[in-house]
Image: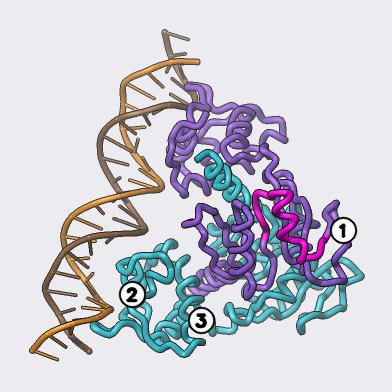
Chain colours: A purple, B cyan, C orange, D brown
Amino acid sequence: MEKKQNVSRAVIQRLPRYYRHLSSLRAKGETRISSRKLAEMLGLTASQIRQDFNCFGGFGQQGYGYSIEKLCEGLEDILGLKRAHTAVLIGVGNLGRALIKNFSFESNGFKLLCAFDSDRMVIGSGMNGVTVRDVSELYAYVDQHKPDIAVLTVPHAIAPALARKLVEHGVRGLWNFTGEDLHLENLGVPVENVHFSDNLMTLCYQVNQTEEK
Amino acid sequence: MEKKQNVSRAVIQRLPRYYRHLSSLRAKGETRISSRKLAEMLGLTASQIRQDFNCFGGFGQQGYGYSIEKLCEGLEDILGLKRAHTAVLIGVGNLGRALIKNFSFESNGFKLLCAFDSDRMVIGSGMNGVTVRDVSELYAYVDQHKPDIAVLTVPHAIAPALARKLVEHGVRGLWNFTGEDLHLENLGVPVENVHFSDNLMTLCYQVNQTEEK
DNA sequence: TAGATTGTTAATCGATTAACAATC
DNA sequence: TAGATTGTTAATCGATTAACAATC
C-alpha cells in the first residue's frame, strides 16, 4: 500500500483531518466521494487532495471517485491506528485526568495501560479502567511492559529529565503537554509538543489584526 | 514598529516560540543574542530568524546582534500580549478546570473573566479567582462584558451552535478544544482549533515509521 | 580600524495549484 | 459511447536558505 518513502510533514498533518471527516461520512452510510466534494468540505483544493492520496498509492477510480470505506481503511493503515500501540500517562493533575476520562486513546491507535503520579491521594485510584500507580514504580513498569509512548502531563520543570529517562528505558514516542520544548528527534524518538501558550498567542495576534481593520 | 502588512502564518506561528525562549533568556539576565546563537538554540537557520524579525522592522544592530529586551518587547507588541484582552471559558469539565487552574491566561495576553457550566455542582464555585456561572446567563454576560474571546471546553456536539451564537453576540475569537472543526474565518472571526486527536495520530504515524527502519 | 553581524536581495527548494491524458 | 473523475506531469507560488554589501 505504501508508495512514496518520504511523505512530507505537511501531508502527514492533513491525514488525521481527512480521516476524521471520512470516518464521519462512513458513519453516515456514505460510500463514495470525489476529490472535488471532499475539497469543498475541507476548504482545500481537489488537486491537493488527489496529490496527497497519491503519496500512498491509488485509492481512487477514474470517473467514479474514491470509496470512503477503502480510504478510511487506507488511512487507518497508513497512520497505524489499528496496531494496538500502548501508552502510559505521567502526571494525574487536571489535564491528565481530562485525558484519561474524556479522550479516546483507543480510537487514535493507542491503549492507555495505566497512569503514574506522586500524590498519595490519587495513587491507587482508577478511572475509565485506568489505574494510577506510584511514580516510583514507573521505570520498572516501563522495563516490563514496554509501552510505545508516554504522555507527559507533569509540571514543565521536570519534563526534560523525565523525557530523557523514559527514552533510556525504551519509550519510542512522547506526547508532551508540559509546555517545555522537547526535542529528541536526534535520538530517533518523535515528540509531539502541545503548546497551549503558543496556540493562544497566535489567536491573540489574529484577534489584534481584526481589530486594526 | 509594524512593517509588513501580510505576514505569513508560517512566521506568526514561530513568534510564540521565539518569545518563549527569549523571555527565558531575559529572566536569566542575558541582554544580547545573535541570530546564529538563537538559531542553534531553536534548531532553525540564522537566515530564517533574521528574515522573520525583519517582517516587523529592525530589532537588531549590525556587528552586535539583537537586544533581548528590545526583542521581547517587540514580540509582546506584535503578538499583542500586553493589551489586556478578555476571555470567558465555557465548559468546566476536567479540561476546563485544568486550564483555569494551571494555565496562565495573563501571560498570554488575556484576562479570564469567568467560566460557565450547566452543572449545579460547579456553578457558584470558584478557582484561581475565576467564578463559575450558570450557562443560562452566558449571552447576557457576553452582551454586557464584551469578552474578546471564548474558550470552548464543552462536548463537541454542541460546539457549532454555541460558536455561532457567541459570534452573533460579538465574540471576536475562539479557542476551541471541542475536537470539532470550527471555521468562522469567513465571518472574520479567527479560531484556533486544538485537535488532540490529530496530534496523537501524527505521533502514531511517526512511531510506526521508526518501527519500520 | 578590523571583526562581527545585521538587513536585504538573489537563489534554491518544496509545496500547492493547474492542466490534461488516461480510463472507469 | 459520453461524462466524470482520477493519476500524474508541468507551472506557479511561497517559504527557506545562501550570499553579501552595509554598518555598527
Asked if B66 appears above or below A159 in the picture, the reply is below
Mark 2 lies on a secondary structure that is helix
Is D23 in front, or is A203? D23
Q: Position of residue B52 (x, y in %)?
A: 36, 70
Which of the two labelled residues, at mark 2 and mark 3, occupies the earlier sequence position? 3
Residue type at numbered disc 2:
Ser
Q: Position of residue C5 (x, y in %)?
A: 27, 79
Q: Callout 3 environment at 10 Å: few (<14), some (14 to 19), or many (20+)?
A: few
Q: Chain of mark 3?
A: B
Labels 1 and 2 in the same subunit: no
Q: Which mark is residue B35?
A: 2
Q: Which residues are magenta?
A: A132-151
Mark 3 and mark 1: span between their CA atoms?
Answer: 37 Å
Residue type at numbered disc 1:
Gly
Residue type at numbered disc 3:
Ser
Q: Which residue is found at the position 51% from the left and 87% from the top?
A: B27
Asked if B62 appears above or below A213 in the picture, the reply is below
Mark 1 lies on a secondary structure that is strand
What residue is disc 1 on?
Answer: A126
Mark 1 and mark 2: span between their CA atoms?
Answer: 49 Å
Q: Chain of mark 2?
A: B
Q: Position of residue B171 (x, y in %)?
A: 64, 70
Q: Position of residue A123 (x, y in %)?
A: 85, 65
What residue is disc 3 on?
Answer: B24
Tag 2–tag 3 contact (CB < 8 Å): no
Mark 3 lies on a secondary structure that is helix
